[in-house]
Amino acid sequence: MQSGIHKLTLSVLTALLFTLLNPVFAQHAVGLHFAVGISYSTAPLKPVGERGFYSLAPGFDYQYTISEKLAWVSSLGLLSTGRHTIDSLRWGSETDGMGNYVPDPTLPHKSDTRVFQLFGAIQSGIKYYVTDNRIRMFVQPYLEGDIFLSHRNTTLYFLDNGDVDTKTSSAEPFTPKRKFVFSAGMGFGADMEVGEHFSIYLVADGKIMTTDVASLNNAISLIPAMKVGIWYKI
């Protein structure tokens, strides 16, 4: 029985090694990508005026083709994310003494807060091709580690005429509670060959990122994005 298990294990390892070293399938490719998305907070407690914040993600790619339908893909790049909140303001001094609200045109009545964070992103996943045509459709689940690089919290206060009230506006740095966070995502896309060595791809991507932006509990970001890239087969 034990001998049979050893033979089966050896057969599986031999088949896997043959697949990895088989020149028909084993191909290396390097590439570049650029993604544009919007970051949304899924925190249970967040400002009423919170909006999506643009997310950008340039980077370098590496792909190792395992078989006709399977490839291992990794990337190294940058990821920007954050929060955008617009609120209406009322001040305690804006009253006629009888409890009625009387706006003061010298005070700002609108705030625009943008919390920007920049990460170094290391991503790794599996690409599975579902079609074998010249344009090859695929799905790509992945995991990602994000290393905190910088943060900026900018708040602008606007007067009723649209001018910025520079006396109350501010821009401050921020130190996060943790400098390494995780993401998990899934992409649906297509590769298209444009030459012997080159191919281009387009991916509709979505990821969940555990972030620590602003003073929110369970501040998790949902980032849908579109990614375009180019491969060069080595």
Image (cartoon, grey):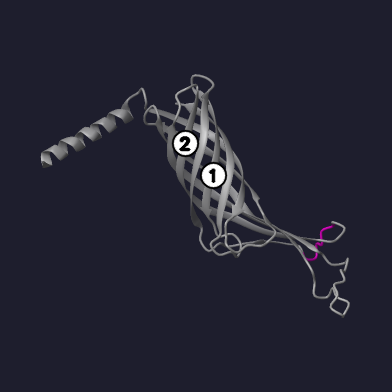
**Residue 28 in which image quadrant:** top left
Q: What residue is rendered at 56% in x and 60% in y?
A: 219
| Real-space CA distance between mark 2 and mark 1, rounded to the nearest whole angstrom | 12 Å
Q: Position of residue 212 (x, y in %)?
A: 55, 60
Three-letter code for the amino acid on which mark 2 is drawn: Val
22 left or right, relative to 151? left
Q: Position of residue 213 (x, y in %)?
A: 59, 59
Q: What residue is disc 2 on?
A: 139
Q: Is residue 164 magenta?
A: yes
Q: Position of residue 42 (x, y in %)?
A: 57, 56
Front residue (pair 233, 93): 93
| SS class, disc 1 | strand
Tell me the magenta residue range: 163-168
Q: Is residue 5 magenta?
A: no
15 to 164, vertically: above or below: above
Residue farthest along the top direction in this orientation: 196
Mark 1 Cα within 10 Å, few/some/many (few <14, many 20+)?
Answer: some
Instruction: Compare marks 2 and 1 and give the one earlier in the sequence.
Output: 2
Q: Which SS does the magenta portion mostly show?
A: loop
Query: Mark 1 and mark 2 in contact (Cβ < 8 Å)?
Result: no
184 to 35, vertically: above or below: below
Three-letter code for the amino acid on which mark 1 is drawn: Gly
| SS class, disc 2 | strand
Point out the image quarter for the C terminus. Answer: top left
Tell me the tag on residue 206.
Answer: 1
17 left or right, relative to 144? left
Front residue (pair 128, 119): 128
